[in-house]
Image (tube, rainbow, N blue to C red):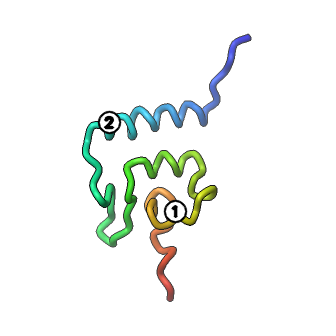
């Protein structure tokens, strides 16, 4: 039987090789990626984790540490 790969699996593979692998050789800073408004992803793997559902599976950590990837930049703003 031939196994098939679904589109989601292909997207994860592509994300890994275009986003994660090139970053493994570069040093991680305290703020990996930030917008001018201060919204940041604190870790280089935030986009990957978000793509596999960690924003909803682990919101306590992801909301504060992967704001860009989880689209939670305004989560802490009260108004």
Nearer the observer: mark 2 or 1; the answer is 1
Give the structural element (helix, strand or loop) at label 1. Answer: helix
Q: Quadrant of the N terminus?
A: top right
Q: Residues within 10 Å of mark 1 (few under 14, many from 20)?
A: few
**Which residue is at a point 66% across and 21% down the rendered structure image?**
4
Q: Residue furthest right?
A: 1
- Horizontal and vertical percent for residue 12? 53, 36
Q: CA distance from mark 2 to mark 1?
A: 25 Å
**Which residue is at a point 38% across and 68% down the rendered structure image?**
39
- Residue 61 is marked as 1
- Horizontal and vertical percent for residue 43? 39, 54
Report the number of discs: 2
Give the structural element (helix, strand or loop) at label 2. Answer: helix
Q: Residue furthest top?
A: 1
Q: Note whether 12 is above or below 55 in the view shown.
A: above
| Residue 6 horizontal side relative to residue 18, left or right | right
**Which residue is at a point 29% across and 50% down the rendered structure image?**
28
Which residue is the site of mark 2?
Answer: 22
**Among the two numbered marks 2 and 1 on one chain, the one whose residue lies closer to the N terminus:** 2
- Horizontal and vertical percent for residue 62? 51, 60
- Residue 71 is marked as none
**Which residue is at a point 33% across and 64% down the rendered structure image?**
35
Contact, mark 2 vs mark 1 (Cβ under 8 Å) = no
- Which residue is nearer to you in this view: 29 or 14? 29
- Horizontal and vertical percent for residue 36? 29, 68
Q: Note whether 18 is above or below 55 in the view shown.
A: above
- Which residue is nearer to you in this view: 46 or 73? 46
Q: Residues within 10 Å of mark 2 (few under 14, many from 20)?
A: few
């Amino acid at each position: 039987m031939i196994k098939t790969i679904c589109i989601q699996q292909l997207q994860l593979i592509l994300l890994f090789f275009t986003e994660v692998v090139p970053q493994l050789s570069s040093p991680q800073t305290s703020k990996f990626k930030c917008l001018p408004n201060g919204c940041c992803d604190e870790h280089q793997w935030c986009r990957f984790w978000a793509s596999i559902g960690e924003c909803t599976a682990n919101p306590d950590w992801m909301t504060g540490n992967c704001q860009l990837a989880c689209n939670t930049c305004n989560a802490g703003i009260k108004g």
